[in-house]
Image: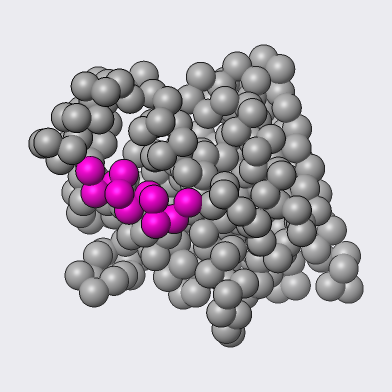
Amino acid sequence: MDGQAQDQVRHIEVGADRRRIAVLREDGTPGRCGVLWLSGFKSDMAGTKAEELAAWARATGRAVTRLDYSGHGISDGEFEDGTISRWAEEALAVHAAFCREPTIVVGSSMGGWIALLLARALVARPVAAAPLAGMVLIAPAPDFTEELMWKHEFTDEIRETILREGRFERPSEYDDSPYVITRALIEDGRKNLLLGGLVETGCPVTILQGQRDDAVPWRHALRLTECLALDDVVLTLIKDGDHRLSRPQDIERMIAAVEVRATEAEAEAG
């Protein structure tokens, strides 16, 4: 994130413990859809996909809103204190406070789970918040704490360590600092599972999924599409795509998908 963007960062307090969350909001042309970016696990709003999406939104006159979850990026808090419920609460608070126009929510990896929880909350209690006009999910990882980590990745020894010590330091493939997986994260994740039943977003959904993704198997995306039975869903499988989907051609696919959903929503609105 460049210095000019840093100067535009605002903060809001979220939750009973008043977590201080960093938000970057850029306004757009009235009458156009906005975009809400939701990052992945231990990622932030200054990543490649987020920056490229913001640049496209800026060039096309669309508002864009980004945030760092607590314990991520430039928001306050410790990563180890984070849970799915806390991060979803923060996304909901940012949407309510900043997204004033129909919004395309774009969620990457864990951000896909957060996006689906945001949509569920809005469907359950529609208030004066801006509606979701569409959703683009990139290698979405709903239920990853249970389905991908606890049941498949973690050995009996790792599970015993988490239960006994309350934490496990998982090596990162992307940097030198490990991912700390806490017992609280695993147990809270179970309160937010989505793949066991119907998932209703109230908007059309596009999913982009790499078939060489070693973090979120492509069949996980297929399972999600089965749960999105009430929504218009487009699933694109990218044969040579990895988990990040950050190559130039992947960025182009992401932006094209967002543009399609935004254009459709704007045309429908008249």
Q: Is residue 188 magenta?
A: yes
The extreme bottom residue here reads 128
Dominant SS of magenta comes to helix
- Which of the image's four quarters has the C terminus? bottom right
Q: Give whichever of 114, 246 is nearer the camera.
A: 114
Q: Is residue 71 left or right of residue 224?
A: left
Provide residue 233's location: percent of width, then percent of height: 77, 48
When asked about the image quadrant of residue 202, the answer is bottom right
Provide residue 60's location: percent of width, then percent of height: 72, 54
Above or below, 16 against 260 in this view is: below
Q: Is residue 125 left or right of residue 61?
A: left
Residue at x 47% of width, y 44% of height: 143
Q: Is residue 20 left or right of residue 31?
A: left
Residue at x 57% of width, y 65% of height: 120
Q: Give whichever of 55, 12 is nearer the camera.
A: 12
Provide residue 156's location: percent of width, then percent of height: 27, 23
Q: Is residue 249 left or right of residue 70?
A: right
Q: Can residue 134 be spotted in the picture?
A: yes
Residue at x 32% of width, y 53% of height: 188
When asked about the image quadrant of residue 34, the answer is bottom right
Residue at x 79% of width, y 43% of height: 234
Number of numbered tags placed on the structure image: 0
Span colored in magenta: 183-193
- Which of the image's four quarters has the N terminus? top left
Provide residue 162's location: percent of width, then percent of height: 19, 35
Above or below, 143 against 131 in this view is: above
Q: Can residue 254 be spotted in the picture?
A: no
Q: How is the image coloured?
A: one colour
Q: Is residue 44 magenta?
A: no
Q: Give whichever of 233, 199 is nearer the camera.
A: 199
